[in-house]
């Protein structure tokens, strides 16, 4: 499993992230504290505290998704 830290600040950023995740054929989870959300769920991601750094764990490779992760990288 690969892991990246991201920060999403606005609705448009969440839309872009969820859209890119939805196009992947592997599981992608977003973690904050003890909460685990499916990254392909718009409502799930919006329910997280977007003022905090989120951890994304995924088990595959997709260049478009990697580019979105890099764009919103928190590190």
Image (spheres, rainbow, N blue to C red):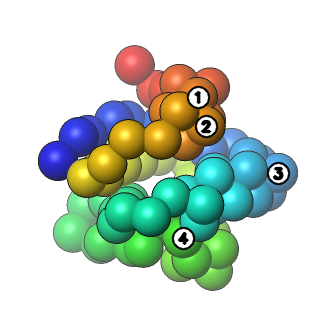
Look at 73% across and 50% down and name the residue there. 16
Residue under pointer 4 = 40
Q: Nearer the viewer, mark 3 or mark 2?
A: 2
Look at 42% across and 73% down and name the residue there. 38
Residue 40, position in %: x, y? Answer: 54, 70
Q: Nearer the viewer, mark 3 or mark 4?
A: 4
Quadrant for residue 75, please give it.
top left
Q: Which mark is residue 64?
A: 2
Residue sitting nearer the eye, 5 or 23: 23
User: Does the residue at mark 2 contact the one at mark 1 (Cβ under 8 Å)?
Assistant: yes
Of the numbered discs 4 and 1, the one sitting upstream in the chain is 4
Instruction: Answer yes or no: is residue 14 visible.
Output: no
Residue under pointer 1 = 67
Instruction: Answer yes or no: is residue 1 visible.
Output: yes
Mark 3 to mark 4 CA distance (whole Å): 15 Å
Mark 2 to mark 1 CA distance (whole Å): 5 Å
Look at 59% across and 66% down and name the residue there. 22
Asked which secondary structure carries label 4, the reply is loop
Residue 74, position in %: x, y? Answer: 46, 26
Asked which secondary structure carries label 1, the reply is helix
Residue 48, position in %: x, y? Answer: 50, 67
Of the numbered discs 3 and 2, the one sitting upstream in the chain is 3
Mark 4 to mark 1 CA distance (whole Å): 16 Å
Of the numbered discs 3 and 4, the one sitting upstream in the chain is 3
Asked which secondary structure carries label 3, the reply is helix
Residue under pointer 3 = 12
């Amino acid at each position: 499993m690969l892991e990246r830290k991201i920060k999403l600040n606005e609705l448009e950023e969440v839309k872009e992230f969820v859209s890119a995740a939805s196009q992947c054929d592997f599981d992608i989870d977003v973690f904050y504290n003890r909460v685990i959300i499916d990254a392909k769920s718009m409502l799930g991601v919006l329910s997280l505290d977007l003022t905090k750094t989120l951890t994304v764990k995924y088990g595959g490779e997709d260049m478009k998704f990697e580019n979105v992760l890099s764009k919103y990288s928190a590190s």
